[in-house]
């Protein structure tokens, strides 16, 4: 699907896709940015930490990780639609919705710096970090 959308936005020269199993041992193919959209919420924290470490090890210095998720408030009091989505994740997969603070901590733990939580659209945000 990404291959279909990338040229529609004139980004064919800047974005590549790669088919693969993200749980495979070894590094991801060379890239300067890793974009995980609605991936971390499918998995428990230890699996998310695995992906974060794998991205950190695979990216070059200056490389960036971007996590796109519907975030809980840091104190987990809401928003209500995120809490409702969280129930779906708990029942349907092994994941959960995370707060910006939880994802920022995961990135920091792996070694990413310049970590930012930025609202994007509706209840969605991106959490970004840069490899020193
Ligand atoms: C919730 S969907 C998110 C899809 C898309 N990124 C989006 O934002 O709409 C989770 C995605 O993880 C992919 N996925 C699950 N296990 C995977 C694995 N082992 N390696 C690579 N992708 C995997 C699924 O194929 C699915 O497309």
Image (cartoon, helix red, strand yellow):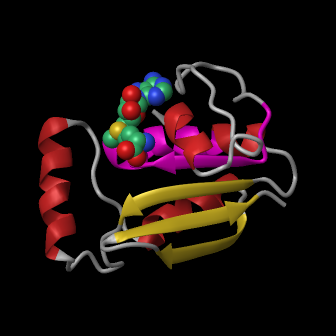
Q: Residue at x 68, y 48 (%)?
A: 11
Whether residue 101 sits left or right of residue 25 in the image: it is left
Of residues 18 and 131, the one drawn nearer to the viewer in this rendering: 18
x and y percentages locating residue 79 in the rendered image: 21, 77
Q: Nearer the viewer, residue 40 or 15?
A: 15
* Residue at 69% from the left image edge and 35% from the top image edge: 16
Which residues lie in the magenta part?
30-53
* Residue 4 highlighted magenta (yes or no): no
Judge whether residue 43 can be spotted in this image: no
Viewed as shown, does residue 71 lie left or right of 29?
A: left
Where 59 falls versus 24 (above or below)? below
Image quadrant in which you'd find residue 70: bottom left
Q: Quadrant location of residue 7? A: top right
Q: Position of residue 17 (x, y in %)?
A: 63, 31
Residue 50 lies in the magenta stretch: yes
The quarter in which the C terminus is drawn is bottom right
Q: Position of residue 95 (x, y in %)?
A: 29, 44
Q: Is residue 57 visible?
A: yes
Q: What's the residue at 85%, 58% (across, down)?
A: 62
């Amino acid at each position: 699907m990404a291959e279909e959308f990338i040229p529609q936005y004139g980004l064919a020269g800047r974005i590549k896709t790669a088919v693969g199993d993200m749980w495979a041992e070894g590094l991801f193919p060379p890239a300067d940015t890793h974009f995980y959209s609605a991936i971390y919420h499918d998995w428990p924290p230890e699996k998310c930490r695995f992906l974060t470490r794998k991205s950190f090890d695979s990216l070059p210095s200056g490389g960036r990780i971007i996590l796109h998720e519907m975030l809980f408030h840091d104190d987990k009091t809401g928003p209500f639609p995120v809490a409702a989505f969280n129930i779906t994740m708990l029942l349907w997969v092994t994941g959960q919705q995370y707060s910006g603070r939880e994802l920022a901590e995961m990135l920091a733990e792996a070694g990413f710096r310049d970590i930012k939580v930025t609202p994007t659209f509706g209840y969605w945000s991106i959490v970004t970090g840069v490899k020193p």
